[in-house]
């Protein structure tokens, strides 16, 4: 049964309800729970098959499902902050009258009608706060907040009748879904990341600014890179960069060029990669951008970090100096970015034969990645030759 069809009925247990509130399918939640267990040192495991049994609350003969193994119970309790007994209690179905259903719809529409620019501004401020939490503490600390916010904005967007309000909420929802996609990618949950980006693309096209759709499409290319589809990523980013040349802001065009450069480096096309980074540098605004488009973290330091990643990937000798300068200029609140930068620097130093210094960055990168639950960076570290 599709997720949308499932949610046309009542949840059968509190566990199922809480999974729905996270805007996840059972397979996505099982994957995220396994990832959480690895990152938090929990021994519990959770397969999709076992999860289907638990969320049902009752067996086919009507008897209550049994408790899961203690380790699995503890895992679910840690994720939701609720006892396993409460999570598994069946929710008895209720038959709502037509008047009740109609009143619920009228209330939802009335709530959406009260959304004005000040409400949208509050929602944007909340997104900005979650972004700060995410970049400093990682997806493990912020993923749940993003999931809850996605559900809230989805509800408001679904019942909004004003075209202008729907467009603003669509842009906000695209940004939230893109953030959830990036978090899932960092946690190593590539299928979940892909699905978040698909949802982000759908709503982005309803915003008044094509920049949101272009940004989401480009970010989805990083999922392709992570599963080894570099050529597909190059094609996608080339098309997106070309599409933005007519009316894209300089900042977005610089970001797209840099993303294209990373994909080209991953495809063993070094000269084209370096030309793409040159384009990005020429397009990058000199000062802070006042663009109201998608959230983009790109200044001279982050562009140098990005270029350094490509230089390290293609084995250029000046990768070390570029990355070292970027590390010294990086805002220390960008923990995930620092972990990735140190992996790049360790890679470049190892190629240069500076193994002792490379090992120092490997150790620091591993510590940071472990703290924030970055399976992506830990996987990159595991692939380094001669790793600690």
Image: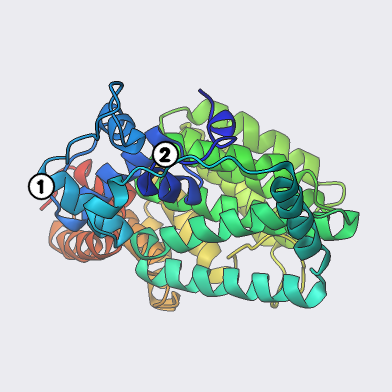
Residue at x 83%, y 64% (from the top left corner): 113
Q: Is residue 340 above or below residue 230?
A: below
Residue at x 64%, y 63% (from the top left corner): 295
In the image, taking residue 27 as reference, residue 205 lies left or right, namely right
First in residue order: circle 2 vs circle 1? 2
Q: Which mark is residue 12?
A: 2
Residue at x 59%, y 33% (from the top left corner): 4
Its colouring scheme is rainbow
Q: Give the percent coordinates (x, y) of residue 62.
A: 30, 27
Q: Secondary structure at mark 1?
A: helix
The Cα–Cα distance between marks 2 and 1, rounded to whole angstroms, is: 22 Å
Q: Which mark is residue 70?
A: 1
Q: Which mark is residue 1?
A: none
The front one of 376 and 194 is: 194
Q: Secondary structure at mark 2?
A: loop
Quadrant assignment, res 171:
bottom right
Q: Is residue 293 above or below residue 328?
A: above
């Amino acid at each position: 049964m599709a997720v949308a069809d499932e949610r046309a009925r009542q949840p059968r247990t509190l566990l199922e309800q809480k999974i729905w509130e996270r805007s996840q399918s059972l397979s996505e939640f099982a994957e995220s729970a396994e990832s959480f267990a690895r990152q938090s040192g929990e021994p519990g495991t959770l397969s999709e098959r076992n999860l289907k049994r638990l969320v049902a609350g009752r067996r086919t003969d009507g008897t209550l499902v049994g408790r899961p193994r203690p380790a699995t119970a503890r895992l679910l309790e840690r994720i939701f902050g609720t006892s396993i007994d409460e999570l598994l209690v069946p929710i008895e179905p209720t038959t709502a009258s037509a008047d009740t259903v109609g009143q619920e719809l009228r209330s939802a529409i009335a709530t959406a009608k009260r959304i004005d620019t000040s409400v949208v501004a509050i929602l944007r401020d909340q997104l900005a706060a979650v972004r700060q939490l995410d970049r400093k503490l990682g997806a493990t600390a912020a993923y749940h907040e993003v999931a809850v916010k996605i559900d809230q904005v989805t509800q408001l967007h679904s019942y909004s009748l004003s075209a202008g309000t729907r467009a603003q909420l669509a842009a906000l929802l695209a940004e939230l879904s893109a953030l959830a996609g990036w978090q899932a990618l960092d946690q190593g949950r590539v299928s979940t990341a892909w699905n978040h980006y698909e949802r982000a693309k759908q709503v982005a096209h309803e915003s008044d600014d094509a920049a949101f759709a272009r940004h989401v499409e480009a970010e989805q290319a990083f999922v392709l890179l992570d599963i080894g589809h570099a050529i597909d990523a190059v094609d996608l980013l080339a098309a997106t960069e070309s599409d933005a040349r007519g009316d894209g802001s300089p900042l977005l065009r610089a970001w797209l060029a840099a993303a294209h450069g990373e994909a080209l480096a991953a495809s063993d096309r070094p000269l084209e990669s370096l030309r793409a980074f040159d384009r990005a540098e020429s397009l990058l605004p000199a000062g802070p951008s006042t663009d109201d488009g998608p959230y983009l973290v790109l200044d001279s330091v982050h562009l140098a970090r990005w270029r350094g990643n490509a230089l390290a990937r293609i084995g250029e000798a000046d990768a070390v100096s570029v990355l070292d300068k970027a590390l010294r200029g990086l805002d220390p609140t960008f923990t995930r970015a620092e972990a990735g930068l140190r992996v790049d620097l360790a890679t470049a130093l190892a190629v240069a034969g500076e193994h002792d210094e490379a090992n120092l960055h490997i150790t620091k990168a591993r510590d940071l990645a472990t703290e924030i639950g970055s399976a992506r960076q830990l996987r990159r570290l595991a692939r380094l030759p001669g790793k600690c």
